[in-house]
């Protein structure tokens, strides 16, 4: 019974202290409003800047993921090491975990549609492209393996291309010309969005055999592969690296392909050089090694590079690009949040300053309350609640302001996202700083001697 009465007594004292704290906030509306504004600006800065950073992170990650999952891109950075198209199928057989692959041809052609005429971007691939890039179709179907083998003049349009031809109506079955050759539209790809998947929405996809004919080439500059899983993709990159090191003569544990006994043509164990052209001759390697470098085997690096220093062949695991972009943008977001959090510190100092002024002004009130029986704990709770009220109202106003600011940035084309983590961090920091910076003034108020307080009246 005594414990119950003690609880009721504490509860009544707490309610009275909370009421007095609220009256203390309302007693000086201009002062309280300016203090609340300081906290609100800090919260708004954190929410809006971290929201912009999070939006940028999501946009970059989405852009990479639009290229497909577990995709490996093999790119020749010099025409001398471009790939034969059939090398894509050979890689699937040789590399464990590589599920499928396609040669890639990027070129341009003059398109004529009815009376309209213009240059369009073309990408040539095989029939496995939708599976490799995880790209569905909005209408129609993709071309088949037989279309590729027969160099059929068929095309699958990117979403924007398909939508623009007939003003939104389905263009499947219509025909157009590329460099004077008539093509039939058999499908339209689903939309990926602006800037995503290498702007596939604005391209025309045709069989790579047909694209090679348009480009006047026999080799391709890229090969895209798809692994079964993330782990398989990592292993495939390692195996592909070994294959192309041997192809370029960089693997010192194996005979240099194409240069055995001073004669070109055969690789290790008497097999033809794997994929693509024979290894360039010694003179050719000197040119690729750049000026001032000795021929291979004369004390210099065995790694042939383009004069600018770029690798001849690059093998990229797109999963790794996604992870790196995600990590980099997370760090940027945290930095933005840290910079904005400084304003929260300033807001907390504002709370402390105002509370100290309030304690000095209300010495008489403190003395009277102590004289009629108020405990130190009652005064401590009262002034802490005043600081909490100010910081809580500022946190709520700042959260609303931050969300409004993100909407404004979004209207001007910025990639933004409402980060609930940022809101949670900003609100917690605001409330914590309000309490921490309110402790000292509250302790001063609770320790003022009653006689001293009454004497100052």
Image (tube, rainbow, N blue to C red):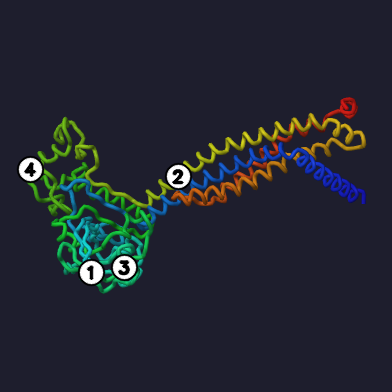
Q: What residue is shown with label 2?
A: 329
Q: Which residue is drawn at 11% across and 45% down?
A: 259
Task: From the viewer's perspective, tell me whether residue 59 is left or right of residue 31.
Answer: left
- Viewer-nearest of discs 3 and 1: 3
Q: What residue is shown with label 3?
A: 188
If you read the primary sequence from the N terminus, does the residue marked by circle 4 or circle 2 appear first?
4
Q: What element carries label 4?
A: loop
Residue 266 point in image, percent of width and height: 11, 51
Residue 355 falls in image quadrant: top right
If you read the primary sequence from the N terminus, does the residue marked by circle 2 or circle 3 appear first?
3
Residues at discs 3 and 1 in contact (Cβ within 8 Å) = no
**Crowding at label 4, few (<14), some or many (≥20) Cα neighbours within 10 Å?**
few
Task: From the viewer's perspective, tell me whether residue 53 is left or right of residue 304.
Answer: right
Q: Residue at x 31, y 65 (%)?
A: 164
Q: What element carries label 1?
A: helix
Q: What residue is shown with label 1?
A: 145
Viewer-side residue, 119 vs 356 = 119
**Crowding at label 3, few (<14), some or many (≥20) Cα neighbours within 10 Å?**
many
**Which labelled disc corresponds to residue 109?**
none
- Viewer-nearest of discs 1 and 2: 2
If you read the primary sequence from the N terminus, does the residue marked by circle 3 or circle 4 appear first?
3
Q: Distance between the residues labelled 4 and 2?
A: 52 Å
- Viewer-nearest of discs 4 and 2: 2
Q: How far apart are marks 2 and 3 (CA)?
A: 33 Å
Residues at discs 3 and 4 in contact (Cβ within 8 Å) = no
Q: Is mark 3 on a helix, strand or loop?
A: strand
Residue 181 point in image, percent of width and height: 15, 66
Q: How far apart are marks 3 and 4 (CA)?
A: 53 Å
Q: What residue is shown with label 4?
A: 262
If you read the primary sequence from the N terminus, does the residue marked by circle 1 or circle 4 appear first?
1
Using the rendered image of the protein, determine whether residue 69 is visible from the camera's viewpoint: no
């Amino acid at each position: 019974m005594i414990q119950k009465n003690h609880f009721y007594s504490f509860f009544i004292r707490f309610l009275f202290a909370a009421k007095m704290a609220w009256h203390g906030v309302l007693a000086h509306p201009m002062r309280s409003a300016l203090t609340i504004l300081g906290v609100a600006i800090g919260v708004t800065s954190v929410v809006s800047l971290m929201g912009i950073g999070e939006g940028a992170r999501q946009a970059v990650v989405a852009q990479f993921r639009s290229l497909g999952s577990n995709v490996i891109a093999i790119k020749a950075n010099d025409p001398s090491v471009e790939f034969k198209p059939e090398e894509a199928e050979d890689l699937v057989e040789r590399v464990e975990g590589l599920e499928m692959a396609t040669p890639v041809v990027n070129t341009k052609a003059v398109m004529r549609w009815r009376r309209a005429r213009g240059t369009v971007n073309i990408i040539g691939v095989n029939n496995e492209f939708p599976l490799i890039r995880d790209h569905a179709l909005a209408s129609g179907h993709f071309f088949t393996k037989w279309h590729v083998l027969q160099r059929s003049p068929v095309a699958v349009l990117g979403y924007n291309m398909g939508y623009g031809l007939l003003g939104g109506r389905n263009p499947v079955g219509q025909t157009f010309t590329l460099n004077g050759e008539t093509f039939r539209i058999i499908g339209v790809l689903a939309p990926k969005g602006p800037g995503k998947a290498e702007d596939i929405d604005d391209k025309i996809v045709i069989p790579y055999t047909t694209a090679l004919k348009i480009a006047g080439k026999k080799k391709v500059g890229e090969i895209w592969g798809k692994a079964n899983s993330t782990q398989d993709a990592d292993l495939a990159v390692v195996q592909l690296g070994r294959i192309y090191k041997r192809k370029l003569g960089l693997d010192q544990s194996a005979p240099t392909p194409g240069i055995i006994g001073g004669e070109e043509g055969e690789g290790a164990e008497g097999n033809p050089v794997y994929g693509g052209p024979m290894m360039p001759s010694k003179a050719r390697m000197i040119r690729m090694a750049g000026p001032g470098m000795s021929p291979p085997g004369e004390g210099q690096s065995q790694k042939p590079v383009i004069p600018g220093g770029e690798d001849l062949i690059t093998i990229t695991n797109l999963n790794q690009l996604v992870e790196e972009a995600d990590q980099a943008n997370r760090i940027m977001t945290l930095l933005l949040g840290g910079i904005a959090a400084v304003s929260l510190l300033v807001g907390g100092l504002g709370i402390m300053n105002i509370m100290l002024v309030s304690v000095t002004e209300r010495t008489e009130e403190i003395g009277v309350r102590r004289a009629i029986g108020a405990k130190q704990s009652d005064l401590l709770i009262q002034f802490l609640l005043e600081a909490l009220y100010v910081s809580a109202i500022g946190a709520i106003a700042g959260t609303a302001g931050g969300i409004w600011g993100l909407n404004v940035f979004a209207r001007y084309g910025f990639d933004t996202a409402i980060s609930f983590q940022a809101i949670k961090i900003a609100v917690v920091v605001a409330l914590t700083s309000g309490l921490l910076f309110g402790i000292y003034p509250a302790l001063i108020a609770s320790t003022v001697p009653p006689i001293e307080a009454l004497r100052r009246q």
